[in-house]
Amino acid sequence: MRAEGKPCRGSLWWRDLKEVWASVGWGRNFEDGVEWKVGDGGNISFWEDSWLNCGALKGMFLRLYSLSTTKAAKVAEFGNWFNGVWI
């Protein structure tokens, strides 16, 4: 949180990078050109990160998120890789 009580929306550098991305015609959104690598899922927030390329699950399933007792959980806490398949 910033001093005036408003949440920070990213660093100035990050906002500048996103602006340059759009201004040079590389795509509508910087996020459109970025791909998540979930790996073992230990660093990716299940609810709050946009790891499925369709937005954060928190926003897509607001009611389910509100009922969840695992709001801070990482992807790795909901499954694992077995023989190349997510279980």
Image (cartoon, rainbow, N blue to C red):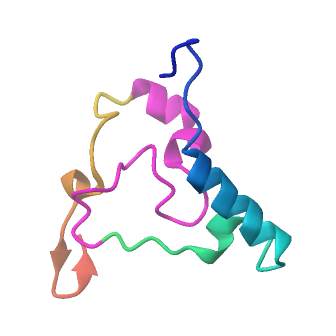
**Measured from the top left, where is residue 9 in percent x and y?**
59, 38
**Measured from the top left, where is residue 15 in percent x and y?**
65, 52
From the viewer's perspective, tell me whether residue 28 is left or right of residue 18.
right
Please, which residue is most extreme toward the left here? 82
Please, which residue is most extreme toward the top here? 4
Please, which residue is most extreme toward the bottom here? 83
Instruction: Look at 73% across and 70% down and name the residue there.
Output: 21
Magenta part of the chain: 39-67
From the viewer's perspective, tell me whether residue 73 is left or right of residue 48.
left
From the viewer's perspective, tell me whether residue 53 is left or right of residue 67.
right
Q: Which image quarter is the C terminus in?
A: bottom left
Give the vertical position of 60 relative to 7 (above or below). Answer: below
Closer to us: 39 or 20: 20
Give the vertical position of 40 relative to 42 (above or below). Answer: below
Closer to us: 85 or 31: 31
Instruction: Look at 26% across and 81% down and name the residue there.
Output: 85
- Where residue 68 sits, quadrant-wise, is top left
Q: How many marks?
A: 0
Q: In the rendered structure, does residue 64 fall within the stretch colored magenta?
A: yes
Give the vertical position of 39 relative to 48 (above or below). Answer: below
Instruction: Look at 74% across and 67% down and name the residue there.
Output: 20
Instruction: Look at 29% across and 56% down and name the residue there.
Output: 75
Give the vertical position of 12 relative to 42 (above or below). Answer: above
**Measured from the top left, where is residue 26 in percent x and y?**
77, 80
Q: In the rendered structure, does residue 46 fall within the stretch colored magenta?
A: yes
Closer to us: 35 or 12: 12
Closer to us: 41 or 30: 30
Main secondary structure of the magenta stretch: loop
